[in-house]
Image (cartoon, helix red, strand yellow):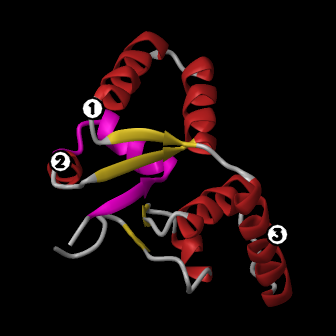
């Protein structure tokens, strides 16, 4: 079984804080994707924080791994976003805009979303969890 996942911002931050269990788990993945929105959220945090150079170095190291790539949105992502936005609005359970985009990318690309954010559970068609799919 091929293991493919997208990382949410909080899990990348966990990696940068030394979460060795997550790092070891991700080493077993065939593909690890960092959605563009996650990259933007990380960069915003770097610019607003006091460890920008350290975090930039850690991000470069993460993105240099052969299994890790940045996931870019396209036209289909916009379609997925629109469907999710309406689904969540109708259910009265909106989530932050960037997270709708992240979920749309994960759904579009059939990726497991590695996250700690419980609000992603409001999207039942999204496969997600803190460590990724069971092996």
Determine the residue positioned at 25% across, 66% down: 2
Residue at 27% of width from left, 34% of height from top?
66
- At 48% from the left edge and 69% from the top edge, which residue is drawn? 110
**Position of the C terminus by quadrant:** bottom left
Residue 131 lies left or right of residue 27; in this view the side is right
Residue designated by label 1: 65
Q: Is residue 132 visible?
A: yes
Q: Residue at x 61, y 37 (%)?
A: 41
Q: Position of residue 56 (x, y in %)?
A: 44, 18
- The CA span between labels 1 and 3 is 32 Å
117 versus 55 height, above or below: below
Measured as percent of width and height from the top left, residue 47 is found at: 61, 18
Which label number is shown at residue 82? 3
Tell me which label, 1 or 3, sits earlier in the chain.
1
Q: Residues within 10 Å of mark 2 (few under 14, many from 20)?
A: few
Q: Report whether 59 appears left or right of 19.
A: right
Magenta residues (range): 3-20
Q: Which residue lies under the disc numbered 2?
A: 27
In the image, taking residue 36 as reference, residue 53 lies left or right, namely: left
The residue furthest front is: 75
């Amino acid at each position: 079984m091929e293991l493919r996942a997208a990382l949410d911002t909080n899990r990348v931050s966990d990696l940068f804080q030394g979460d060795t269990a997550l790092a070891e788990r991700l080493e077993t993945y065939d593909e690890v994707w960092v959605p563009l929105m996650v990259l933007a959220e990380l960069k915003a945090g770097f610019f607003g924080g006091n460890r920008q150079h350290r975090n930039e170095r850690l991000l470069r190291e993460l993105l240099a791994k052969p299994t890790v790539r940045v996931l870019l949105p396209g036209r289909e992502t916009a379609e997925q976003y629109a469907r999710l936005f309406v689904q969540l609005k109708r259910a009265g359970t909106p989530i932050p805009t960037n997270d709708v985009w992240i979920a749309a990318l994960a759904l579009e690309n059939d990726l497991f979303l590695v996250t700690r954010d419980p609000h992603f559970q409001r999207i039942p068609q999204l496969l997600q969890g803190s460590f990724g799919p069971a092996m």
